[in-house]
Amino acid sequence: MDLLRSLPIGLYLEKPLTWLHKLDPRVKLAWLMSLILSPLLANVYWRIFLVLFLIIITGLALIPWRVQKKQLSFLLFFSTLIFIMTSFAPDGFNITYQPRLPNSEISITQPTDFQYIIYQIGKFKITQRSFDLAIRVSTLFFTLIYSSNLYLLTTASEQITAGMEELLSPLRKFKIPITEIILTLTLALRFIPLVLEEIQNLIRSIRTRAINWKKLGIKKSMQVWVIVAERLLENILLRAEQISIAMEVRGFTTPNQHQVQWHQLKLSIFDFLAILSLILFWIARISIGSN
């Protein structure tokens, strides 16, 4: 088991370099926030459009199927499960309506094909409200997770922090320690693979010892896992100490005096086209996607 490669969400794709990789991280962050905020108070058609839009963008970026296989199958499975559960869930309108006036022999209104109950199996039924709510919830779940995952898939952690520092730089006028916050975020992103590696090594060490958990019982099994947790904490603290020593050896004093520029952020022609597309995206959202 390789935790660093088996996790389906949040991995950075180093190769091949697609056109999404080459976009400025600030532009991609603006697109990410737009994809997250645009479903709010949007109609059903706009939410379905966002799902199709993300899938089309992934296809145009020529991201390998071996990378997308686990991620798309995982999200589509849970989105479909949420859709089915919400469709058959009660819609909250369990009220028996009774007309105020008696039925007239002469019908004034014209009959329509509208049916509030779309489908019914025994006591379970799909109504217009539950069906609409199922589409909203499932598409929102897919859009939020997949857009964030696509951003992490095509943007390195150093680019993310560099872009955030540029966007948050005006807050320095209010004496907010932006550089310290970004440095902490960078170290945290760099520290996650080390934690996964330590967990992976401990799990492999337990498997090689072929422990018979049935003979140990619940009490002794819990004692073993407590020892493993203590060992994991010791290894993580040791890694953190090694990182701090390495920074001190390299002459690190404060984030403001010892800045390392990982990436020189500069907007290209493709970034301006992406910004123009983002403006058109919000025009379409306001004119078409509103309820």
Image (cartoon, rainbow, N blue to C red):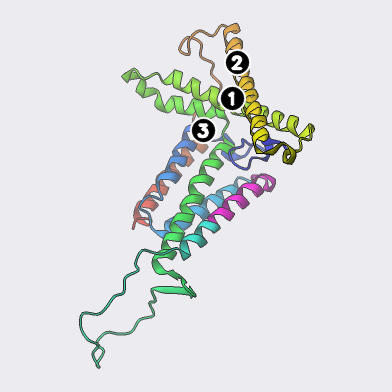
Q: Which residue is mark 2?
A: 243
Image x and y of residue 13, in percent: 64, 37
Q: Which residue is mark 1?
A: 191
The residue positioned 29% from the left and 75% from the top of the image is: 97
Q: Nearer the viewer, residue 102 or 41?
A: 102
Indicate whether 146 appears above or below 185.
below
- Is residue 163 magenta-colored? no
Image x and y of residue 26, in percent: 47, 32
Classify residue 165 as left or right of residue 67: left
Q: Amino acid at mark 2?
A: Ile
Q: Nearer the viewer, residue 203 or 212?
A: 212
Q: Earlier in the sequence, mark 3 or mark 1?
A: 3
Residue 15 at least partly seen:
no
Image x and y of residue 225, in percent: 65, 31
Image depth: mark 3 or mark 1 in front = 1
Magenta-highlighted residues: 63-80
